[in-house]
Image: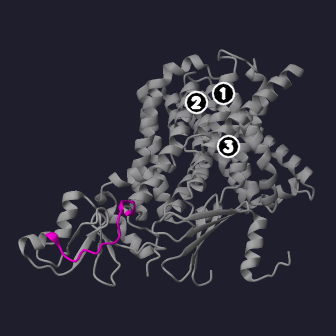
């Protein structure tokens, strides 16, 4: 796994990737479930509870991923 | 025929509607399927949709078989084998504690030795589905303790295979000890054979059921599973274990992912039918007679699980919050307890087992999400010394852990510039600390009086921060640790 990303098996659910964003104030965990659903856990507040959890379907995750990679969507 | 279809359809629909209503408030589905069966069954006053539950027994056993088959197919063998010794120790403690507590209660009830053995399993083996859904709903997938919880319930599934292999020979009513030993030998020998098939014969099995068309794969798959389950039942090993093992075999083949996808809707429907049919057999009148044993069982389960959570927390160096979450998340009992109840009733054991396990599952179904969601209250009362020795793991292994008392933070800023107690006595201080719960400003531990710690001892307010300019650190007296700067604090 690339530097700054730590993976963790979640038996029966899938795999979790903790992304180190280089600052203490932000953290991102992505859970890739075996059925293709992705959960984005976003931590930006002063506790161990995530401030937001976003559940993406396989297709939604692809779109978001493409945007993050820099693909341009005409529509 | 028309009447049967009508009653069955209505019953399944009601079960689905009830479960959907329960899901609105995050309750698990399995108990509601069972509840629908109880309410509309022949033994309960009021409308009766199915007068002869035994007519549905084939559909119900199809549900049981598919449930266990799916469990086998999706069993994450690699993840479990790679998870290390510590997890097996934690899961072993969890299982040993729960099973022995169940066994003790079973014998205390005095319904019989076989019954006690069934109660041990019904109380000891938690529902993977309920725990997994809870973790997703409570948004705890990123927590430090979550891999531990998931590891424990997966290893429990593995234990289920061994338990079933032991249970069916015991329930078969062997006359002598020798005969019992023989039957247990056959049972475990059969397990070994199926393990060998899983190891070496997976390709052959794949060739038997593989087809490019989903339609045929689904059909061949169901046929194979039912056949193996039937053979297992025929030689005195339960159909449940045969289904589980053939699932493990299929999991090693190339068609695994397609099978997993195809079996899922079938399992959902027929497993629900299995739970409904179990409910139909329950006599509401008997539930009153088992209320006290159920109460004892529920309390015992909660206490034992909290203890097991502490053991796991200590092993993995979790903090109070993690340990409380482990203990209270694995509380749900569901499919396996009901399967065991069905096996026991089929074998002609004490009929009180049916209502006993039904009520037990129902009560825990309501309690477990509530308790899991409020685990922080338990975390607060767990004494530090129970978990403390494990803390070295936190530093060595970067399991992300924070102080459990962060929810006690009420106030984070102060412009006070003196320690009022030192001022009152005319003493000096070195640096200033502020209590994060009430905002009191006191002097630090290098000062002559260390009023900050005195404040903690008097009030129990656990957290302080430094008030020195440019210093942001926080310290927790209870956890005796510097609190990691909360991730995401927006202050510079």
For residue B387, which quarter of the picture?
Answer: bottom left
Question: Of the numbered discs in the image, which one, if any, rests on residue A11?
Answer: none
| Mark 2 touches mark 3? (CB < 8 Å) | no
Tell me if B395 is positioned left or right of B172 in this view. left
What residue span does the magenta drawing correspond to?
Answer: B406-420
Residue at left offset 42%, top offset 36%: B299
Marks 2 and 3 sit apart, C-alpha to C-alpha, by: 22 Å
The answer to whether any part of residue B182 appears in the image is no
Chain of the residue where label 1 is placed in the rendered structure? B
Where residue B130 appears, as percent x and y from the top left, is 60, 46
Q: Name the residue beneath numbered marker 1.
A: B279
Chain of the residue where label 3 is placed in the rendered structure? B
- In this rendering, the answer to whether B199 lies above or below A45 is above
Q: Does the magenta stretch include residue B407?
A: yes
Q: Is residue B108 magenta?
A: no
Q: Is mark 3 on a helix, strand or loop?
A: helix
Q: Name the residue beneath numbered marker 2.
A: B358
- In this rendering, the answer to whether A72 lies above or below B378 is below
Q: Name the residue beneath numbered marker 3.
A: B241
Where residue B300 appears, as percent x and y from the top left, is 42, 38
Q: Considering depth in this image, is B147 or B66 the residue closer to the camera?
A: B147
**Quadrant of the snapshot with the C terminus of chain B:** bottom left
Tell me if B91 is positioned left or right of B438 in this view. right
Callout 3 and callout 1 share a chain: yes
Q: Nearest to the eye among marks 3 and 1: give it.
A: 1
Tell me if B391 is positioned left or right of B430 in this view. right
Callout 2 and callout 3 share a chain: yes
């Amino acid at each position: 796994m690339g530097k700054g990303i730590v993976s963790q098996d979640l038996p029966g659910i899938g795999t979790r990737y903790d992304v180190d964003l280089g600052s203490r104030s932000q953290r991102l965990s992505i859970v890739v479930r075996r059925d293709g659903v992705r959960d984005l856990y976003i931590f930006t507040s002063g506790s161990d509870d995530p401030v937001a959890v976003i559940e993406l379907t396989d297709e939604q995750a692809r779109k978001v991923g493409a945007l993050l990679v820099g693909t341009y969507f005409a529509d | 025929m028309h009447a049967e279809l009508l009653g069955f359809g209505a019953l399944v629909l009601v079960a689905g509607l009830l479960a959907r209503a329960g899901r609105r408030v995050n309750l698990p589905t399995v108990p509601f399927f069972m509840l629908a069966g109880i309410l509309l069954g022949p033994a309960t006053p009021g409308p009766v949709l199915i007068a002869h539950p035994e007519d549905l027994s084939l559909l119900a056993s199809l549900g049981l078989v598919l449930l266990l088959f799916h469990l086998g197919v999706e069993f994450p063998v690699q993840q479990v084998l790679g998870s290390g010794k510590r997890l097996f120790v934690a899961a072993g403690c969890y299982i040993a504690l729960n099973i022995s507590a169940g066994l003790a209660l079973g014998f205390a009830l005095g319904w019989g030795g076989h019954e006690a053995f069934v109660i041990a399993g019904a109380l000891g083996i938690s529902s993977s589905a309920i725990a997994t859904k809870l973790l997703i709903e409570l948004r705890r997938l990123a927590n430090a303790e979550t891999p531990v919880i998931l590891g424990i319930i997966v290893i429990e599934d593995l234990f289920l295979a061994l338990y079933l292999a032991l249970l069916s020979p015991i329930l078969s009513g062997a006359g002598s000890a020798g005969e019992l030993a023989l039957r247990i030998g056959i049972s475990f020998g059969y397990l070994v054979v199926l393990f060998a098939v899983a190891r070496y014969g997976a390709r052959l099995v794949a060739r038997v059921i593989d087809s490019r068309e989903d339609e045929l794969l689904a059909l061949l798959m169901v046929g194979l599973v039912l056949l193996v389950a039937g053979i297992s039942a025929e030689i005195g090993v339960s159909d449940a274990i045969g289904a589980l093992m053939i699932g493990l075999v299929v999991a090693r083949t190339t068609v695994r992912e397609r099978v997993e996808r195809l079996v899922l809707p079938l399992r959902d429907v027929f497993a629900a039918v299995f739970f409904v049919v179990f409910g139909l057999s329950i006599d509401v009148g008997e539930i009153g007679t088992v209320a006290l044993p159920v109460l004892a069982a529920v309390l015992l389960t909660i206490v034992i699980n909290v203890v097991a959570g502490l053991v796991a927390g200590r092993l993995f160096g979790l903090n109070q919050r993690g340990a409380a979450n482990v203990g209270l998340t694995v509380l749900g009992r569901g499919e396996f307890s009901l399967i065991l109840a069905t096996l026991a009733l089929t074998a002609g054991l004490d009929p009180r087992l049916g209502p006993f396990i039904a009520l037990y599952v129902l009560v825990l179904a309501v309690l477990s999400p509530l308790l899991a969601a409020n685990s922080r209250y338990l975390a607060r009362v767990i004494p530090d010394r129970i978990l403390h020795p494990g803390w070295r793991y936190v530093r060595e292994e970067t399991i992300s852990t924070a102080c459990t008392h962060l929810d006690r933070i009420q106030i984070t800023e102060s412009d006070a510039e003196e320690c009022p107690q030192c001022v009152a006595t005319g003493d000096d201080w070195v640096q200033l600390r502020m209590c994060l719960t009430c905002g009191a400003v006191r002097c630090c531990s290098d000062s002559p009086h260390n009023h900050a710690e005195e404040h903690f001892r008097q009030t129990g307010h656990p957290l302080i921060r430094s008030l020195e300019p440019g210093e942001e650190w926080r310290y927790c007296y209870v956890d005796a640790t510097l609190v990691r700067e909360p991730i995401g604090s927006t202050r510079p």
